Amino acid sequence: MSYLGVARSLTGRRWVGPGAETERQAEAMVQRTGLARPLCAVLARLGVPPEETEGFLEPRLRDLLPDPRALRDMEPAAARLLRAVGARERIAIFADYDVDGGASAALLLDWLRRMGREATLYIPDRIDEGYGPNVPAMRDLAARHDLIICVDCGTLSHEPIDAAQGADVIVLDHHLGSETLPDCVAVVNPNRQDEDGTLGHLCAAAVVFLVLVEAGRQLREAGTRGPDLMALLDLVALATVADVAPLKGVNRALVRQGLKVMAGRARPGLVALADVARLDTAPSSYHLGYVLGPRVNAGGRIGQADLGARLLACTSPHEADAMAQRLDQLNTERREIETAVREAALAQAETRGLNAPLVWAAGEGWHPGVVGIVASRLKEMTNRPAIVIGLDGAEGKGSGRSIAGVDLGASIQKLAFEGLLLKGGGHRMAAGLTVARDALEPAMERLAALLEKQGAGQGGAADLRLDGMLMPGAATAELIDQLERAGPYGQGAPGPRFVLPDMRIAYARQVGSGHLKIACDDGLGARLDGISFGAFDTPLGQALAEHGGARFHLAGRLEINEWGGRRAPQLRLDDAAPAG
């Protein structure tokens, strides 16, 4: 049943409000805790019992951090790392080219530097070498190093790791493993087949952090101390959000604490990146996922593969500024390439149908550095798992993004095992694949069938989920600060979204490149400003700009607009529907 009777909004979406049970839980929480009703609505939707609200609103990392030794191979991995440090061995770090890989590498580089050691960084070129360790690179690194640490990759790299003769190899990863593991010193991975999956939601940087926690424990047992690990949590937070890890349990605490560290502006690379992105407020999970993360990723997508990791590990503000400027330029170029691919992919997917369990598109020469972003856009638009593939010669390389409750990585891996893919792997929410051109259609057909069994395609393609109604007079800065305590928000924990019902549009005008600025009131004196980015790319902008005195239900997220030293509540408008 649609919320407020909105079966089709101005952007074509059905509005879905909280269920009866969530409403009852929210009311019980109000009675028991005395917290604001909108905050209780969000907590109830997130599944927080009334008796656990205090601990949820103030998560402590010490209470939520798991024992690192709960993961297999943890102790030998940390011991081998410490032995390399103590013996002044030559260490190489082989990392993936995305944010998680770059942050994982920077964690180790930073920690090693604090221990008085340096390491070689190696990140493969996305186009020339592809994802993960390869035989030539591993063979070359092994000839010049004693220890190779593979981060955010390596779990499926049996042959390349075998080629690393003369060097020990440690794998610190989170991608799905197969029944057999590479022959190496240790594979620390919560998604190994012989793990119970309890920590399967960790990104690679969080796995690396746990290894460093274990290393610190072993150092203390030996009568010495290691570096301050809390200072490294800004990198873990960035990787957790950018890699779309669910913000629950320890992940939520890692991101919450990491944002506090980041606000201290102690890491030159992140300071330079925030400045070049004109980020003038304390960072939030939104900024990690949509402002900083894409810029770190830009080097691996269309430029120099190791640029993001080098920036994150940089200690010189001058060098950091130069790298951040270059990444910002690459990100602009990436957006232009992405726009062209997105338009072509959407047109193709619409022709194929957007209501199937899997939305997919494949095109000649589509840049492999942007297919993942485009897949994410299709997923967000349709509420379905999406795959986008760039074809080149006899093969296609693609990337996929999934929705909550549908394990894309496992299905991709199954297709690779069945021989329908040349290569494939990943985790629940994201995966990569290589497919023969002549096997493309049957592979996607089989993948759609596997995903349908998991429930893909059952949800509405255009549902906007809402936490309830709110009058503009209640949308205060104090309430917004309270709602932030239930964050950080992101994958697995969507941010609060409310409806302002039956609003009069006091004014509405276009600003910038297709954005909409509005002010609304309830007719009783309470007024609220709002903004909708890209509103004129949809019917929303035109309808509100030419409202003609009509009243509307307005749906969106509350935020603080800081300008000229003044903090004022503002509605980030997502959607609207005629009232009445």
Image (spheres, rainbow, N blue to C red):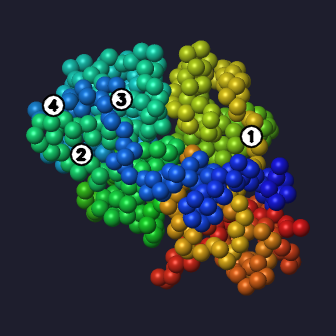
| Direction bottom: furthest residue | 525
Marks 4 and 2, Cα distance to the nearest angstrom?
14 Å
First of labels 3, 4 by sequence position? 3
Q: Earlier in the sequence, mark 4 or mark 1?
A: 4
Q: Which residue is mark 3?
A: 71
Compared to 496, does 568 lie above or below? below
Label 3, label 2: how far apart the Cα atoms are? 21 Å
Q: Which labelled disc corresponds to residue 111?
A: 2
- Nearer to us of marks 4 and 1 is 1
Amino acid type, residue under disc 2 in the picture: Trp
Residue 186 is at least partly visible in this image: yes
Residue under label 1: 459
Circle number at residue 83: 4
Q: Alpha carbon of mark 3 to alpha carbon of mark 1: how far?
A: 35 Å
Judge whether 391 appears above or below 534 on screen. Answer: above
Number of marks in the image? 4
Q: Residue 244: x and y, percent?
A: 52, 44
**Element class at badge 3:** loop
Q: Residues within 10 Å of mark 3 (few under 14, many from 20)?
A: many
